[in-house]
Image (cartoon, rainbow, N blue to C red):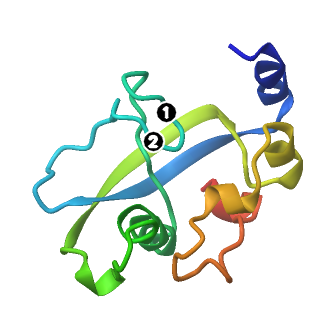
């Protein structure tokens, strides 16, 4: 474990998060669960990670990043229809990456958080604190 990173994470801003969040999934998926397959925020075989978002536009942008970005010749209209699942969240002590100082502390930029080719990349900005925690 990188103890310097752990200390930087511990010093970053946290937030309480409550409300309805969504996730895009294959139409075959009926149950929302975390994945241990690895990805941007979880190591393969590690702890389960559940990617959720709001508003709906962020779900669309994430679907684009996951299914179109990095696939040579892929376009959004080639993606099969998706299902959007909704779940209620009520957690505290969440690393708050909306604020630049917190992102800097853990070595992330907005570019790390958003895929380079998603449709809203030029217009998506982190939500304000009051708009995203209710």
Q: Nearer the viewer, residue 112 or 120?
A: 112
- Residue 132 on image: x %, y %: 64, 60
Q: Quarter of the image holding residue 14? A: top right
Residue at 74% x, 17% y is: 2
Task: State left or right for residue 39 relative to residue 98.
Answer: left
Label of residue 42 in the image: 1
Q: Quadrant of the N terminus?
A: top right
Label of residue 39 in the image: 2
- Residue 90 on image: x %, y %: 51, 39
Mark 2, secondary structure of its residue = loop
Identify whether 27 is placed above or below 7: below
Q: Residue furthest front?
A: 72
Label of residue 111 in the image: none
Identify whether 13 is placed above or below 130: above
Q: Nearer the viewer, residue 134 or 3?
A: 3
Identify whether 43 is placed above or below 51: above
- Residue 23 on image: x %, y %: 36, 57
Task: State left or right for residue 2 relative to residue 56.
Answer: right
Q: Nearer the viewer, residue 61 or 56?
A: 61
Whether tag 1 and tag 2 are in contact, CB under 8 A, the answer is yes
Residue at 38% x, 73% y is: 72
């Amino acid at each position: 474990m990188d103890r310097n990173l752990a200390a930087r994470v511990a010093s970053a801003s946290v937030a309480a998060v409550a409300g309805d969040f969504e996730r895009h999934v294959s139409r075959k998926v009926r149950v929302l669960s975390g994945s241990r397959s690895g990805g941007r925020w979880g190591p393969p075989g590690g702890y389960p990670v559940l990617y959720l978002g709001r508003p709906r536009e962020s779900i669309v942008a994430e679907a684009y990043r996951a299914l179109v970005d990095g696939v040579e010749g892929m376009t959004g209209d080639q993606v099969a229809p998706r299902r959007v699942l909704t779940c209620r969240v009520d957690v505290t002590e969440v690393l708050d990456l909306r604020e630049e100082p917190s992102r800097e502390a853990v070595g992330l930029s907005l570019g790390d958080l958003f895929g380079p080719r998603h449709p809203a990349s030029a217009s998506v900005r982190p939500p304000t604190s009051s708009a995203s925690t209710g």
